[in-house]
């Protein structure tokens, strides 16, 4: 059984490099039977081998540990396609433009899927001059709160970090903003299409 590196990713990356098991084995100084065991999940590489294995497979150690190869394609630098990752331990918020492996506090952070706003999680959005004023009556206790508000347009993102027992409010420059995201520490990520609301 695979422990921390999946055999399928080793096989996938090896085949992408057009290498046989024997060729990979020769490069990393193990037998082809050893590579076969790794790929079938009957064994796994020693942790000290991961850097040399990753280098020969054209991958990063984190890709091997995650079990997925990262293939970034040109997303035309469009922030509307960006993905959000949130650490459940420290609240760290990370925007990514393409495929990536992100971890924080030893936890792999998947890209979050935003849900449409719902009755318990709604925002009041008004326009003040050239800005959106965003607020909510959502609970802001230490155990249940909105962690951040973010406004995203095709070329930029604006993020305001919120804290328990504070106000759930922020102001964002309107220029090009299409989505406003907000993250509830209990219920996850929500999104409002402000252009449809207007």
Image (cartoon, rainbow, N blue to C red):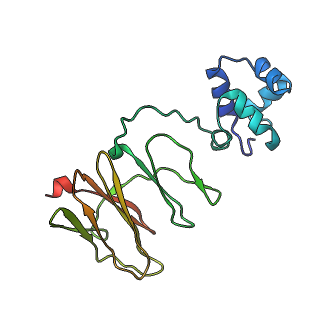
Q: Position of residue 80 (x, y in %)?
A: 32, 46
Q: Is residue 169 above or below residue 94?
A: below
Residue under the image location 65 percent in, 29 percent down:
58
Residue 22 seen in the current view: yes
Q: Position of residue 136 (x, y in %)?
A: 28, 73
Q: Residue at x 37, y 54 (%)?
A: 114
The image quarter containing residue 64 is top right
Q: Nearer the viewer, residue 92 or 34?
A: 92
Question: Residue 26 versus residue 158: which sits nearer the camera?
Answer: 158
Q: Is residue 150 above or below residue 25?
A: below
Question: Quadrant location of the N terminus?
Answer: top right
* Total marks in image: 0
Q: Is residue 82 left or right of residue 154?
A: right
Q: Is residue 44 visible to the viewer in this orientation of the structure?
A: no
Where residue 35 appears, as percent x and y from the top left, is 78, 27
> With respect to residue 102, does 50 lie above or below?
above
User: Horizontal and vertical percent for residue 150?
Assistant: 35, 60
124 sits left or right of 71 in the view? left
Q: Is residue 137 above or below residue 72?
A: below
- Residue drawn at x 64%, y 27% is 13
The C terminus, quarter of image: bottom left
Identify which residue, 9 or 174, lies in the foreground. 174
With 179 as the anchor, is 98 left or right in this view? right
Residue 161 sits in quarter: bottom left
97 or 107: nearer the viewer: 97
């Amino acid at each position: 059984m695979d422990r921390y590196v999946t055999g399928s990713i080793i096989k996938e990356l090896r085949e992408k490099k057009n290498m046989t098991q024997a060729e990979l084995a020769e490069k990393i100084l193990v037998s082809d039977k050893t590579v076969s065991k790794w790929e079938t999940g009957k064994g796994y590489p020693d942790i000290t081998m991961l850097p040399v294995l990753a280098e020969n497979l054209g991958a990063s150690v984190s890709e091997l540990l995650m079990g997925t190869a990262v293939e970034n394609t040109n997303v035309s630098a469009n922030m509307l396609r960006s993905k959000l990752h949130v650490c459940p331990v420290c609240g760290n918020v990370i925007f990514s433009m393409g495929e990536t492996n992100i971890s924080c506090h030893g936890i792999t952070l998947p890209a979050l899927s935003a849900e449409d706003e719902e009755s318990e999680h709604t925002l009041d959005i008004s326009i003040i001059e050239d800005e959106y004023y965003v607020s909510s009556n959502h609970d802001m206790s230490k155990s249940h709160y909105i962690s951040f508000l973010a406004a995203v347009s095709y070329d930029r993102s604006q993020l305001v970090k919120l804290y328990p027992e504070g106000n759930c409010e922020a102001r964002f420059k309107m220029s090009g903003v299409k989505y406003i995201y907000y993250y509830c520490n209990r219920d996850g990520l929500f999104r409002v299409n402000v252009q449809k609301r207007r």
